[in-house]
Image: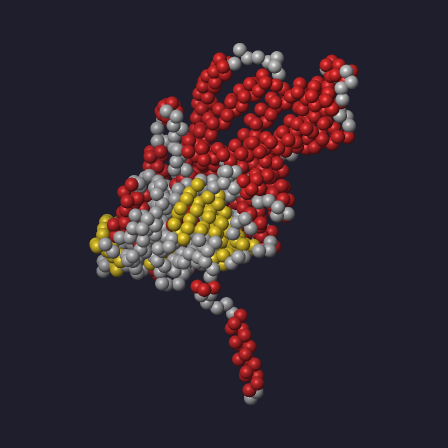
Amino acid sequence: MTTYLLRRLLALLPVMLVVVTIVFFLIHLIPGDPVAVILGPEADARQIEDARRVLGLDRPLPEQLLRFYARLLRGDLGRSYFLDRPVTTALWERAEPTLVLMASALFVAVLIGVPSGIVAGAHQGSGWDRALMTLALLGVCVPGFWLSLNFVYLFSVRLGWLPVAGYASVFQDPVAALRYMLLPAVSLGFSQSALIARIARSCMIEVLRQDYIRTARAKGLAERSVVYLHAFRNALVPVVTVIGITMAILIGGAVVTEIVFNIPGLGRLIISAILRRDYPVVQGVVLLTAAVYMLINLVVDVVYAFIDPRIRYV
Amino acid sequence: MRHPKTRWTVVALAVVLALYLPGPLPDAAAQKKGGVLKVGNLGEPPTLDAHWTTATITEVLTNHIYEGLYAVDARTQPIPMLAEGMPAVSKDGLGYTFKLRRGIKFHNGKEMTSADVVASLNRWGAQSTYGKTLYARVAEVRAVDAYTVQMQLKEKTATVLISLAIPNNFAAIYPKEVVDKFKPAEKATEWIGTGPFKLVEWKPDRHIKMVRFDDYQPRKEPASGYGGRKVVHVDELLWLPVPDAAIRVAQIETGELDFADDLDLNAYGRLKKTAGVQPIVAKPYYWLVAVFNKKEGLMTNQKLRQAWQAALDMEPIMKNVAGGHAELYRLDSSLAFAENAPWHTKIAGLPWNEKNRDKARRLLREAGYKGEPIRFMTTQEYKWMYDFALLSKQQLEDAGFTIDLQVVDWATLVKRRNNSKEYDAFTTGMGNFYDPTHHIYLGPNWPGWTNDEEINRLLADLAGETDYRKRFALWEQVTRAFYDRVPVARYGDLFGLRAMRTHVKGFDTTLMRPRFHNVWLEK
């Protein structure tokens, strides 16, 4: 297991190198000039040239890339053009909101998705099944931002139960944090719960057709223990994969949710960085996201081994 | 003959009426001290170094932290701020002596002296758009004594005071130590001023927190425009970046924000009906403009530019951009806004808003135009830009133009517009220019590159002339030349929309950009 983990972790490095290189070229391929944005619409050409020199943007692209690699080796992601601070600091400041959002959304997704999938699967063709699956279909189809805006309108503007947008740290004010996080977590988690529910249902149906389930039933076990003890655990492996994928999708979904609910996280950071061509920040966020994505994959693979004792890594 | 009783009734009525008439501002006792004022704005400033950028968001924020020697009043005239009074000008008009106010403290507790002023002005003169323009005529700025600064000019100009007073990219006074630490080309990252608010925390994407500066010394003159007496009543001014316009509107409706700036014009009707909310029409905001590339390509042809101007029908364009609200736009041909009274022109018969398709077609023929696509660059990041570009395209194509509308993001637009090979026209907005010599689109150094002999000569005369009446006559000539050469197509004036909760009191709604001194909360 340890060698397996080490090998997987080492394999991250070349992937990261490719990712940062591609991102470097992609972001520089998009036309646009950070300096013209910083200096304001009235700036003239000479001012822009001067500022480009100060930021090192006048150097040839390959040279900029080499400098970027050199800094990266020292663990330095560069300095943001706009935020007047190192990129690592900017990332660190925004990690908490995004992590809290992802964790809460995942919690909502699993809380809704897994039970409804199991219930629907266990009672295939029933009214419950149809109702839950229609809901799941809706969840997959409705765009997240639309759901968010409607939640805001209903629960904040009309009913006044929850704040429209904003963020409070869980560590400083847990109650306010919950109030702020509720709508974003539900609107982000809901569509993901639909995906989880559908997978959980089909796995459940498949497992319930297996011989050992028939055996269990033939033994005279209660339906409840057949479904929840025997079938559920075996249906879990694909569900865990989906939860892993969900986490990865949530990174993307968080971008939209953070914008709508004004959460100062990584999603908002990368959007403003792209719009303003804050190259070092874009590279930093992508690098971090890629790393997290790959780590999630690794964790999912490891978790398999715990759920299914037949899976062994060497 | 009048009955005595009637007379008494008249007097009594007059007294009662007088009580209801708007009187002078309530005295200090009526203004509540304390509270946190939450202001929602559209995002993060690129910097809080006022010398560095012309970005509006930086202008709004930095004017709460810093001050200059002068400020503009309600009539857009310079009035003293950190300077004691108006300067003494030498007989030849080349020497300006500024006396500084004494006992003015920076937020770090240090007293402001001439050393700080000289260092700051020189930094501003090296970096700011307006500073550079003025410093082209400045020979030297030096300290005479601790509270006296002398500016020596190479050539006479009427623009010294207004340049020092304009709030955008402004001549903010920093402590000398900050100036020494950050060269003009580097953004300052220590933000210490003499303003009524002190910056305590800037957490990007979360908030910018300012508090009342207790050692602030207000001027004695009443508040006017951006100057005069400034008193801070709130304990804290919290700027919250809320990039989504719909969310800013929702947050002012629910009261999560006390004040919201830059709102979607379509929300105007809804906000008017919301209890506890007062929508504010911000005048002036921008006049919309299509800037032509006069260095290279199709639009170097003056006839083609005249055809563009002749084809436009402003009313439907502006109405649409303003979300259908007549209060939110204005049709005006003057290059200076009506609010900028000293420079507002009223010239009849200019070829503006002609909506004359036949004239446009004739001009197109004379230009030898054969339907080549004209690359018109715009962005959806500013909805109004996209809207007026789209409506223009329709009207222009009806008159025989072929418009290739290129929709890009703002960062791309501001880069491409510096390259004469990449476009024929682009959209933007023109804010308020306090002096005729500041109208960037008339000069050769700004994208579009207007380089017209007559306009250049008139602007040079304007820069050197100091008599207002002669300057105004020159400005009228510039305006006429402008409508003949059409360096850019001027559309109508668009107003901005902001809103505040009704418990926010004392806010001056006539200001082009918000200021939160003299504002208090009644809740």
Q: Inspect this view and state whether residue B471 appears.
A: no
Q: Which residue is located at x 77 percent, y 16 percent?
A: A219
Give coordinates of residue B108: x percent, y percent: 32, 48
Asked if residue A302 can be seen in this view, the reply is: yes
Residue A22, above or below B491: above
Work out whether B520 lies above or below B15: above
What residue is shown at x 54% (from left), y 73% (from top)? B17
**Of A196 and A114, which appears nearest the observer?**
A114
Q: How is the image coloured?
A: secondary structure
Tell me where residue B313 appears, x and y as whole percent: 54, 49
Q: Position of residue B237 (x, y in %)?
A: 45, 50
- Residue B342 location, x and y as percent? 40, 59
In the figure, B145 relative to A35: above or below? below
Task: Please give the name of the residue rendered at 61% of the width and 19% of the height, measured from the top-left corner.
Answer: A307
Number of marks: 0
**Residue B284 drawn above or below residue A141:** below
Front-most of residues B357 and B283: B283
